[in-house]
């Protein structure tokens, strides 16, 4: 079993859009869910997942009436699309929060890939609804993220305090019982707390002892986390009392390929000092999302950095906090191989095997004990994992596992 080591530290508007025809996905070249290809991982518990729903939002979907964007990308075509763009793209689904009414909140990331080129990309939470019969996704509206109370202690890009991709790189989202949002950022890394209208409620909360190169408080110091490797995933405990944000990169001095998961107490508004370490199958991999299954377990997306036919690792693991072998370590089990999904009805193209071959797959939600929703971040307009030379759409799929997760019912009811 691949181990997750426990470490204790003392520091504490509605727009309906039809999807274009999808090219038949390539046959899976990756191992099945039961094949023991990654050293130490227990892969016998779950078999091949089955595709039960497919919907797509076209890459060139823009927020109605929004400002132009992409002015810092030059004017050369990228995957057939020439910047700058006529509006704010509805793209980069980097976090998801289920609303239990058939709709979902999805979070756009920092925009166009880095701090330097994303100052005209407005950070936003979109509300969407998939229509699996029509294979399309409706955009029902959304809110821009703003700081009208001037709680951010460092200079922002815009005088109107609307947050941009040059201010934060938001990659994970949790919706709490009071309707407010907690968002994980990669530039700090920071935790950000917003109200229902997307207005910041308190100053960004830093992770003690960890700073990325983009952190504005470096003051000439050295970062100990690589660029864009902050909070990529974040789970909320099933009782709603704690957050478990998960870094995408390894902190300097930690073993290669190990990622810290911290615990944050929502009632106290502070880190508890407890943390765990998620160990990647390979140090070159990254995580895409994390969500709680029950008080002890999480689903975590792990991926390589490849796309299309070159993609080899796009997986969902079940990570368990219980110490099965009494050695102070936790384990992970493969739940679904996203490059080897059964599609007997041809929902995603030709009947046979469906692949989800995107560079960045960053959203997972539990719909019932055997059904997961999975979405890609299309990195508009740069990724072309589905069709070479064509900008990826935002795809929303549902998959059925071979058996139940035995999840806490509060996760999906």
Image (cartoon, rainbow, N blue to C red):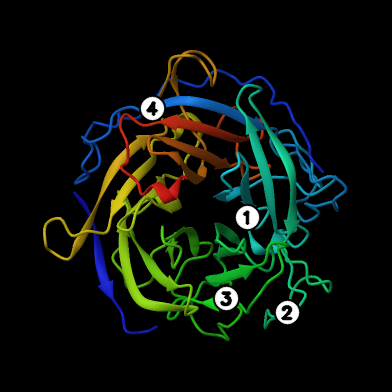
Q: CA distance from mark 3 to mark 4?
A: 39 Å
Drawn side of residue 297 relative to residue 134, left or right: left
For the residue labelled by badge 3, is the local secondary structure a helix, a strand or a loop? loop
The residue that mark 4 highlights is 340
The residue that mark 1 highlights is 109
What residue occupies the far right of the structure in this picture? 65
Q: Position of residue 1 (x, y in %)?
A: 18, 48
For the residue labelled by badge 2, is the local secondary structure a helix, a strand or a loop? loop
Drawn side of residue 188 relative to residue 152, left or right: left
For the residue labelled by badge 1, is the local secondary structure a helix, a strand or a loop? loop
Label 3 Cα neighbours within 10 Å, binned few <14 / some 14-19 / many ≥20: some
Drawn side of residue 264 relative to residue 171, left or right: left
Q: Which mark is residue 155?
A: 2
Q: CA distance from mark 3 to mark 2?
A: 12 Å
Q: Which mark is residue 345?
A: none
Whether residue 389 is visible: no
Of circles 1 and 3, which is in front?
1
The residue that mark 3 highlights is 215
Q: Based on the displayed image, in which of its 4 quarters is residue 123 positioned?
A: bottom right
């Amino acid at each position: 079993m691949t181990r997750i080591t426990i470490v204790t530290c003392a520091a504490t508007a509605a727009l309906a859009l039809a999807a274009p025809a999808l090219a038949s996905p390539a046959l899976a070249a990756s191992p099945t869910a039961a094949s023991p290809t990654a050293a130490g991982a227990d892969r016998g518990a779950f078999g091949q997942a089955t595709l039960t729903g497919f919907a797509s939002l076209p890459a060139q979907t823009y927020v109605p009436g929004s400002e132009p964007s992409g002015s810092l990308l030059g004017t050369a075509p990228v995957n057939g699309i020439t910047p700058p763009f006529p509006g704010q793209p509805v793209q980069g689904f980097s976090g998801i929060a289920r609303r239990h009414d058939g709709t979902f909140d999805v979070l756009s990331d920092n925009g166009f890939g880095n701090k330097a080129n994303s100052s005209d990309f407005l950070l936003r939470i979109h509300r969407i609804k998939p229509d699996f019969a029509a294979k399309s996704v409706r955009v029902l509206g959304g809110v821009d993220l703003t700081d009208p109370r001037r709680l951010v202690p460092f200079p922002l890009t815009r005088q109107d305090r609307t947050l941009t991709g040059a201010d934060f790189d938001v990659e994970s989202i949790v919706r709490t019982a009071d309707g407010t949002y907690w968002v994980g950022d990669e530039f700090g890394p920071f935790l950000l707390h917003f109200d229902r209208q997307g207005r910041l409620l308190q100053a960004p909360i830093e992770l003690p002892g960890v700073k990325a190169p983009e952190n504005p408080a470096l003051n000439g110091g050295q970062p100990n986390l690589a660029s864009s490797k902050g909070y990529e995933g974040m789970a909320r405990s099933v009782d709603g009392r704690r957050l478990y944000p998960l870094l995408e990169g390894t902190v300097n001095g930690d073993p290669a390929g190990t990622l810290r998961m911290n615990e944050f107490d929502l009632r106290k508004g502070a880190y508890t000092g407890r943390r765990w370490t998620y160990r990647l199958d390979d140090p070159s991999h990254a995580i895409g999302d994390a969500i709680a299954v029950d008080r002890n377990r999480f689903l975590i997306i792990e991926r390589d950095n490849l796309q299309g036919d070159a993609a080899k690792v796009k997986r969902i693991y079940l990570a368990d906090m219980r110490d099965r072998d009494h050695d102070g370590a936790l384990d992970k089990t493969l739940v679904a191989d996203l490059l080897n999904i059964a599609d007997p009805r041809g929902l995603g193209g030709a009947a046979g095997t469906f692949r989800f071959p995107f560079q960045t797959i960053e959203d997972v939600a539990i719909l019932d004990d055997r059904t997961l929703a999975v979405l890609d971040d299309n990195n508009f307009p740069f990724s072309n994992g589905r069709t070479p030379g064509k900008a990826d759409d935002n795809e929303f799929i549902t998959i059925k596992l071979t058996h139940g997760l035995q999840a806490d019912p509060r996760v999906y009811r």
